[in-house]
Amino acid sequence: MHELLTDEPGKKMILLGNEAIVRGAVEAGCRVAATYPGTPSSEIGNTLHRMSKDAGIYFEFSANEKVAFEIAGAAAVAGVRAFSFMKHVGLNVASDAFMTMAYTGVRGGYVVLSADDPQCHSSQNEQDNRYFAKMSGVPMVEPSNPEEARQMMRYAFDISEKFEEPVLFRTTTRMNHVRGVIELGDIRPPSGNVEFKRDMKRFVTVPAHARTRHLHLLELIKKMRDESEISPFNKVVVPRKRNIGPGKKVGIVTSGVAYNYVMEMLESVELGVEVRVLKLGMTNPLPEDMISEFCQEEDLIIIVEELEPYLEEEVKILCKEREIPVTVLGKREGYFARSFEMNPDIVLKGVSSALEFEEKGEVTVQEWKDLPLPPRPPVLCPGCPHRGAYFALKKVTKGKAIHSTDIGCYTLGIMPPHSTGDLLICMGGSVGSAGGLTRVIDEPVVAHIGDSSFFHTGIPALISAVHNRHRFVLNIMDNSTTAMTGHQPHPGLPTGGYYKDMATAISIEKICEAVGVGFIKVVNPLRIKETQEAYREALEYDGVSVVITRSPCALLVDRELRKRGRVGVKYTVDQDKCKHCHLCTNQFACPAFIRTGDDHFIDPNICLSCGVCEQVCPFGAMGPIKEVDQ
């Protein structure tokens, strides 16, 4: 049995934030869960994948976030507790269904987690998904640590059922990936199958029904605001070091991870003023009466939040409407940036500026970018099949093609020396972008997309490209996994979620054939000449051509070998044959290569035995290490 299924209320564990979220869902009696993997939420799915059957939870890795939302949402409409989760940009994909389900509501509790990514640690933007809650009208909660995340999951399911509305559970990277002590609660067993109760006027959103449901939602928001006033996660906190002095009374309004930075800052310095903190855990609808009462007792309000001035704007409007004579400062006045993460030093700098005096105490104000950290650019792994594909393609195109790329490990092909990335927008965007490029430029266009991303949102764009007779090469880089987020399965594999080895594998090449692609070739990118020839033919084809470069992720191959107690054949450089042309390091650039002066070596500790280097060297200087008889 998985440790997160331990039924010992009161027992304490140290858990990752994402693991605490899973435990909260288990305690709440979640029955159905679905996702498309995306950092920083990936560990939630990985954990559920391992334990869902024992927990009595149906779990699946869906083709994309919209499908995951619909799977879990439909189950909640039927009357069971359900959970879907995704990274912040994933909610963009699911937003069509999300916005409408705010109208229909649900019968069972439904929690939708959005893992936002300030600082763009693993994302193409920093969007602040708190605005999705405001735009849709659904309630929203924001935990600040793993224990609160566990508690909030239970609370979110409860208020979802109370108001029959989905609840947006907003986290950020630091919350998802921090470890902390949690105290186990009791487990509510998940329900079994239920009988679906028809209600067309509620759940079939033709215009006449949708208009009525919108009015219902607007009335419901008023009731949810009353809930926010009594929520145990909205509270006034007085720091242990109260900083009482003869100066102003200062109130800090904050939420989520930013609350931790505020408290650490307050306990590290003497500000010389009396400070109280309003910690908001339910942040839509906001507790307007609580905020008003808090602001009326202060001389100055400082808003501390990451990304957009969401709380700041709401507090300023509220104080203006209720004629509360207090100054509210935050991002709009420039005391805090509207980009990137915060930390205690950044909070201290902003608060000190707002107080208009030099900070005192032990904390030194220092931005993260000033820290003398060594550069560590991301690279494709040793043995990665994508490297062979990019090397072969560049040889064929001589660097003159334009490349639209996508979201995945293969995105790292943008790095020198391959430099195969000229446009990157979003998941599945490479295929649609390629069609637009071909209509306005004369250079050949190659679109790159991974196998998982192809199933996610690449197929509709390919259908459109064939229908509209675009001309480009679609390079589907199939490494048999969703590698970037932790090797989760996708529809192209015979492995799913709940029934791990009972899924149907969908053929990529048959999909391409079915939508009308006229040129389809499957090659092993570890065979360079074969791959070059495939690209050469594809570039000459008059229409949309597809080259599927299929070879398992090198990390998966290495893992399987190690499970069997084996190690792949390592490669080395014959120094007598090496002509010091530097092609291996300058054009292929495997991380296992080491260049010392003009000499080249292969590090056997990180070589993953792909054997491509033997094909790359024009002088035959690279090859497998030969065993020597003793």
Image (tube, rainbow, N blue to C red):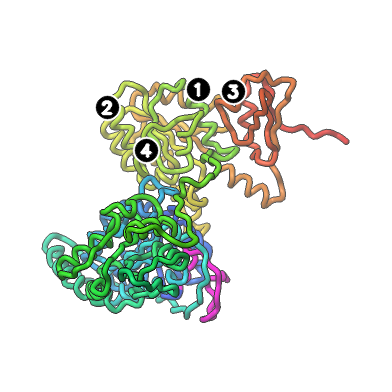
Tell me which numbered mark, 4 or 2, is placed earlier along the sequence.
Answer: 4
Q: Is residue 34 left or right of residue 481?
A: left
Which amino acid lies under the numbered mark 4 shown in the image of this protein?
Leu
- Cα gap from disc 3 to disc 1, whole angstroms: 12 Å
* Residue 292 to residue 122: above or below: below
Residue at figure coordinates x 45%, y 59% from the top left: 174
Q: Position of residue 331 (x, y in %)?
A: 29, 55
- Can you identify the residue that label 3 sits on? 583
Tell me which numbered mark, 2 or 3, is placed earlier along the sequence.
Answer: 2
Tell me which numbered mark, 3 or 4, is placed earlier along the sequence.
Answer: 4
Which amino acid lies under the numbered mark 2 shown in the image of this protein?
Arg
- Can you identify the residue that label 4 sits on? 424
Q: Position of residue 435 (x, y in %)?
A: 30, 32
Q: Position of residue 513 (x, y in %)?
A: 38, 37
- Cα gap from disc 4 to disc 1, whole angstroms: 22 Å
- Can you identify the residue that label 1 sits on? 395
- Cα gap from disc 2 to disc 3, whole angstroms: 35 Å
* Quarter of the image where the N terminus is located: bottom right
The one nearer the camera, 17 or 304, is: 304
Q: Position of residue 458 (x, y in %)?
A: 36, 42
Q: Secondary structure at mark 2?
A: loop
Q: Secondary structure at mark 1?
A: helix
- Can you identify the residue that label 2 sits on? 439
